[in-house]
Amino acid sequence: MASHPRRRPRLPLRYLLPLLVLGATLAMLMLRGYVHNEILADHRVRPAVANDEVPRRILDGGPVVDTRDGRSASLRVPDHRIVLTFDDGPDPTWTPRVLDVLRKHHAHAVFFVTGSMTSRHPELVRRMVAEGHEVGLHTFGHPDLSYHSTRRVDWELSQNQLALAGAAGIRSSLFRPPYSSSANAIDNRSWPVTRYIGSRGYLTVMDDTDSEDWRKPGVERIVRNATPHGGRGAVVLLHDSGGDRHQTVQALDILLPRLQQQGYTFQTLTGALRAPSADTQVTGLDLWKGRAWVFLVRAADDITGVLVVGLAAVGCLVLARFGLMLLLSGAHTRRTRRSDFRWGDEPVTEPVSVLVPAYNEAKCIEHTVRSLTRGEHPVEVLVIDDGSADGTADLVEALDLPGVRVIRQENAGKPAALNRGLAEARHDLVVMMDGDTVFEPATVRELVQPFADPGVGAVAGNAKVGNKNRLIGAWQHIEYVMGFNLDRRMYDVLRCMPTIPGAVGAFRKSALERVGGMSDDTLAEDTDVTMALHRDGWRVVYAEKARAWTEAPESVQQLWSQRYRWSYGTMQAIWKHRRAMFERGPSGRFGRVGLPLVSLFTVVAPLLAPLIDLFLVYGLVFGPTGRTIAAWSAVLAVQAICAAYAFHLDREPLTPLLSLPLQQLLYRQLMYVVLLQSWITALTGGRLRWQKLRRTGGVAAPPSAPAGRQPARAGSPAG
């Protein structure tokens, strides 16, 4: 039989796209950093050394040094001709003003441009060429070439030419070394570079008249420095970039007409020397490579600009969220912890139905139901076995606990199991919990007290991580205490609580029936039904004393699956209830207050938050390192303050917060990727299935349970 070759497994689109987005973003940042001289920048300047190896005819010669084809010659500009040269541009502020003055006085010049500035401002180079000026090379990143190898010199030249080709469709044979001055300043270190530059076909252009405008000595001083004596010709050094050049512009406006009246003409270098133009047209592949380069640089600048705006936006959102949490959670705590605070005239004492949907929960279901039977409030417990294959239902029935019923059904999903439990529940107050969760004795009692207020339709309890002894559990513990419970206090005050946690929540059965029960339209049925209750006019509140201890995922893969479902389900719920933004009454209030807050704080801010870490890495590698560390430390300090406050409110020890910096660097990155994958799944129309987590049964009892009240093991009497 012919064997069929195995197909290589393809990377799913939902994994591939985040990698592509990350790779493209990093590439854009690296390109921008390179063009802005933040990457591979070298600002060293070598001090002068001896010049005994430099030919005397070069040292005593003119400002134009010709070392092409092995020559060692120099040229001077003829009398009454001036070549104005401008270094370090083009600059978006000063180069246009220089060009305006030159055009005003019908003068031409030579602009020695860097590749980095040319790539960022190609339109200015096009204007130079269009107005008859000559353009020369000044390297790409302005390093002192005497420090570098010939390979780096070639790179600087080729990148400079690439930028010129993309900006104006030309290449140039004129070159001016960075940090250069007159020919007599060439020394034993720079002379080999000059000879190598000539071997590559370039004329090296120095100067013989330095305006010293870089010192900013004043307009009149610049004019005097730039004026040649005795009618001789000159190559004048000026700058159109590198800082404030208003003195240069003003000096030009005085210098040009003054010297023109004395018979001077202002020409390009080749025009003054009566030579063919140094700028030639580029065609074919080189032209398209240059255009592609300029396009990518512009795109990198634009994208980075958008990212910076996004960074500012996420900074504002993070600070606004922390500010709201601190302010409103404090108000919530002061209100609910007053000695005279009551939800209603009388405490709620009526019996409650507790629904426990279970699918393959054999490892932890006993702990769950036993914690309920030890409660301080009268309950009936309904364990809805959703087609378990591990004997979950048989185990519960074998316990033979009073007030505990088992309902069996074929596997239909959690919403269907909850709706089946609602149909079987005998009481109007219904508590829902997960099969891996244990309650404290007072949990149910505390959870149902808010129903003394007839306007309350649902209550969110205080879900806590029971298995927090490992690092990944400790990180989730921080997230639960700070990110969930502090949020719930805030949302309670704003009356727009978005989610009743599946681990510990209570509902009026009549309220659920009004909104159609638990829906399977989304993967976050708890968020979906909470939003539906808001839209129906019910209040949803938070009961901090109703503590439940749940088993959090203990591996990265399980955590990924859980949070992926949560994120995607939340997006589905927001989209499902989007029309609330345009409705009247309670629905409209939730739509215009709750939905924007949930979208901003749960979806948009976490999606943009990776920019903080992206710019952190960029700043640490390419600078400014000190300011980067200070900024990130400030953000971490704000988070630490909020976390400490949340732990204080929950009366939790602060020890787990020692791992907060590591959580921000590692755990948070996983949450970013999960959210990005959820976005991609939503945008590509993917459908996510329920993903069952593997249970270990590690949460046997609430950590605060008295020593004598530990749950019995399977087969032992329930004391």
Image (cartoon, rainbow, N blue to C red):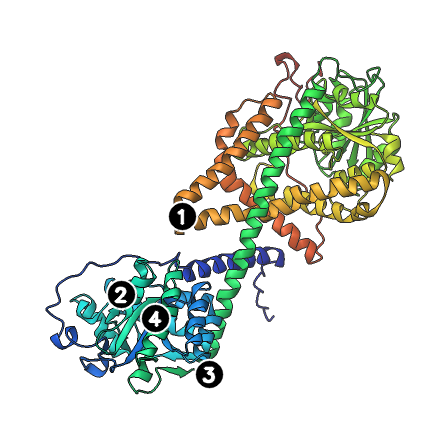
- Of circles 3 and 2, the one toward us is 2
Q: Mark 1 points at which residue?
A: 624
How many labels were placed on the picture?
4
Using the numbered discs, state the Cα–Cα distance from disc 4 to disc 1 in whole angstroms.
40 Å
Dot label at residue 696: none
> Which residue is at a point 64% across and 38% down the rendered structure image?
694
Disc 4 or 1, which lies upstream in sequence?
A: 4
Q: Residue 131: x percent and y percent? A: 45, 79
> 426 and 447: which one is in front?
447
Circles 3 and 4, Cβ within 8 Å, touching? The answer is no
Using the numbered discs, state the Cα–Cα distance from disc 3 to disc 4 in whole angstroms.
42 Å
Q: Name the residue under label 4.
A: 255
- Of circles 3 and 1, the one toward us is 1
Disc 3 or 1, which lies upstream in sequence?
A: 3
Dot 2, how many residues are within 10 Å of its Cα: few (below 14), some (14-19), or many (20+)? Answer: many
Q: In this view, does 120 lie above or below 427?
A: below
